[in-house]
Image (spheres, rainbow, N blue to C red):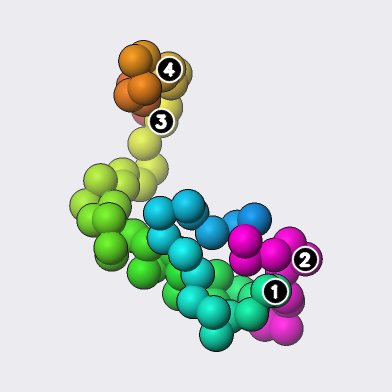
């Protein structure tokens, strides 16, 4: 919905190492949320690690590192 505004604040939503733009205000639109996520992904080179249409069998965190196990399709 184009007129949807988030009901939770930017300070709750933003990543601690990547603050939201102050222009977004305390409550932001879906366009601003998408811009923030795209900027975050660009800043931390996340996109190259995203796999689409992958079946995940299990995940576990070992010594602070997430292991992701693929299942069969």
* Above or below for 48 versus 53: below
Mark pair 1, 2: CA separation: 7 Å
Residue at figure coordinates x 42%, y 27% from the top left = 56
Q: Place residue 31 in its image quadrant.
A: bottom right
Q: Does label 3 or label 4 sit earlier along the sequence?
A: 3
Tag 1's secondary structure?
loop
Q: Does label 1 or label 4 sit earlier along the sequence?
A: 1
| Quadrant of the snapshot with the C terminus | top left
Residue tagged by mark 4? Answer: 60
- Is residue 8 found inside the magenta-colored segment of the image? yes
Tag 3's secondary structure?
loop
Q: Which residues are magenta?
A: 2-11
Q: Nearer the viewer, mark 3 or mark 2?
A: 2
Q: Does label 3 or label 1 sit earlier along the sequence?
A: 1
- Identify the residue at the far top of this view: 62
Q: Does label 4 or label 2 sit earlier along the sequence?
A: 2
User: How many circles with numbers are drawn on the protein?
Assistant: 4
Which disc is residue 55 wearing?
3
Q: Nearer the viewer, mark 1 or mark 4?
A: 1
* Above or below for 34 versus 2: above
Q: Nearer the viewer, mark 4 or mark 2?
A: 2
Residue at figure coordinates x 70%, y 65% from the top left = 9
Which disc is residue 7 wearing?
2
């Amino acid at each position: 919905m184009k007129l949807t505004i988030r009901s939770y604040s930017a300070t709750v939503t933003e990543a601690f190492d990547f603050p939201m733009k102050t222009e977004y205000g305390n409550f932001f639109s879906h366009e601003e949320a998408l811009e923030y996520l795209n900027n975050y992904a660009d800043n931390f080179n996340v996109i190259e690690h995203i796999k689409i249409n992958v079946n995940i069998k299990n995940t576990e965190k070992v010594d602070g590192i997430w292991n992701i196990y693929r299942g069969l399709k």
